[in-house]
């Protein structure tokens, strides 16, 4: 039962962090994060890993030449 | 392009709503093909197609999702054909299995915080890069670009359930890879150890 509860919390937190909950469900999750230490621990862990992933992927910055080339082709087209 | 609106209107719309996503598109393109030149070509092709059909785009709607869909289709059509590499995993085969799994949308890892806090970005990037393309795509779209399941489903043309199961599978693969890295760094996986100890004590 405890395992199932843990999975249920992870599932709810996952849906929240993946931006797939309704506004009222989001509020409910945030309330639980505030009031329940074990829920908060799961939330923090999931959030930290997502942030690690997000920060690890190197973001590109395209060269001004590419932008210029696209704009030129559009004008020529 | 429609003649109903002026050329200036479409040029302004292009600059204002489409071009600001160019860096995100390039990041996505690069992580699909791992080649700077191909990524640039892909981004350019995406913008040229977007401009050609700009009259189909509704001002103020989700330009980013629209552009990502065009890019993904361009990649599938042009670049995947070139590689002719067979997909190693039958993704849809696992969908029904994971759909029924109550852990199906469960989040990420049970890695202890101290484990992943010490991981180098390179290791995480390597783990992401080693994912099969279908799995890498959903991780990039969800965790890096912040699209919802519904948006991802539209971008990659699969049902939401498939997005969820691919995410689940991708995260599990990442978890295993990162655990291996963590162990290499000297961390021990103690998951379940406390529970096991408690169970043993109760049995005694």
Image (tube, coloured by chain):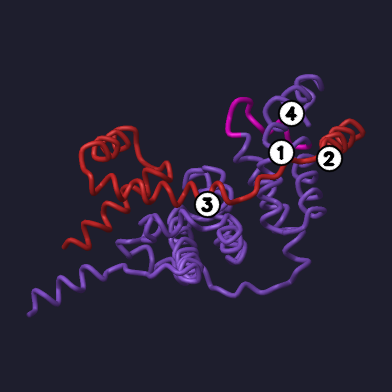
Q: Main secondary structure of the magenta part?
A: loop
Q: Please, which chain is the residue tagged with disc 2 on?
A: A
Looking at this view, is B53 or B138 the one in front? B138
For label 4, the SS is helix
Q: Which chain is purple?
A: B
Q: Chain of mark 1?
A: B
Q: Which residue is mark 2?
A: A66
Image check: A36 left or right of B6?
A: left
Question: Do discs 4 and 2 share a chain?
Answer: no
The CA span between labels 3 and 4 is 31 Å
Between the C-alphas of marks 3 and 2, the distance is 28 Å
* Residue that badge 4 annotates: B14
Q: Residues within 10 Å of mark 3 (few under 14, many from 20)?
A: some
Callouts 3 and 2 in the same chain? yes
- Specify start and end residues of the magenta stretch as a single range: B52-62
Residue designated by label 3: A53
Kindly report which numbered mark, 3 or 1, lies closer to the viewer in this rendering.
3
Q: Give the image location of residue B66, x and y in percent.
A: 63, 40
Q: Say whether marks 4 and 2 touch (CB < 8 Å).
A: no
Chain coloured red: A
State left or right for residue B83 relative to residue A23: right
Asked if disc 3 and disc 4 are in contact, CB closer than 8 Å, the reply is no
Q: CA distance from mark 3 to mark 1?
A: 21 Å
Reading the image, the residue beneath label 1 is B22
Q: Residue under mark 3: which chain is it in? A: A
Q: Is residue B17 magenta?
A: no
């Amino acid at each position: 039962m405890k395992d199932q509860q843990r999975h249920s919390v992870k599932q709810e937190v996952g849906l929240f962090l993946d931006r797939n909950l309704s506004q009222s469900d989001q509020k409910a999750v945030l309330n639980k994060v505030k009031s329940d230490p074990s829920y908060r621990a799961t939330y923090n862990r999931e959030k930290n890993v997502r942030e690690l992933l997000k920060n690890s992927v190197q973001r590109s910055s395209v060269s001004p030449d590419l932008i210029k080339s696209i704009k030129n082709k559009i004008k020529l087209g | 392009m429609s003649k109903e609106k002026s050329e200036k209107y479409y040029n302004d719309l292009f600059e204002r709503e489409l071009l600001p996503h160019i860096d995100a598109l390039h990041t996505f393109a690069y992580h699909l093909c791992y080649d700077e030149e191909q990524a640039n070509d892909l981004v350019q092709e995406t913008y040229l197609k977007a401009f050609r059909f700009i009259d189909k785009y509704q001002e103020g709607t989700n330009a980013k999702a629209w552009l990502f869909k065009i890019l993904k289709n361009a990649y599938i059509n042009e670049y995947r054909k070139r590689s002719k590499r067979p997909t190693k995993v039958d993704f849809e085969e696992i969908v029904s299995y994971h759909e029924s799994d109550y852990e199906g949308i469960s989040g990420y890892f049970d890695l202890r915080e101290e484990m992943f806090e010490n991981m180098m970005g390179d290791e995480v990037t390597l783990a992401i890069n080693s994912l099969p393309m279908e799995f890498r795509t959903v991780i990039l779209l969800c965790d890096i670009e912040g699209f919802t399941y519904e948006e991802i489903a539209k971008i990659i043309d699969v049902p939401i359930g498939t997005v969820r199961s691919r995410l689940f599978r991708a995260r599990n693969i990442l978890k295993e890879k990162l655990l291996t890295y963590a162990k290499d760094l000297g961390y021990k996986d103690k998951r379940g150890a406390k529970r096991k100890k408690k169970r043993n004590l109760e049995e005694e």
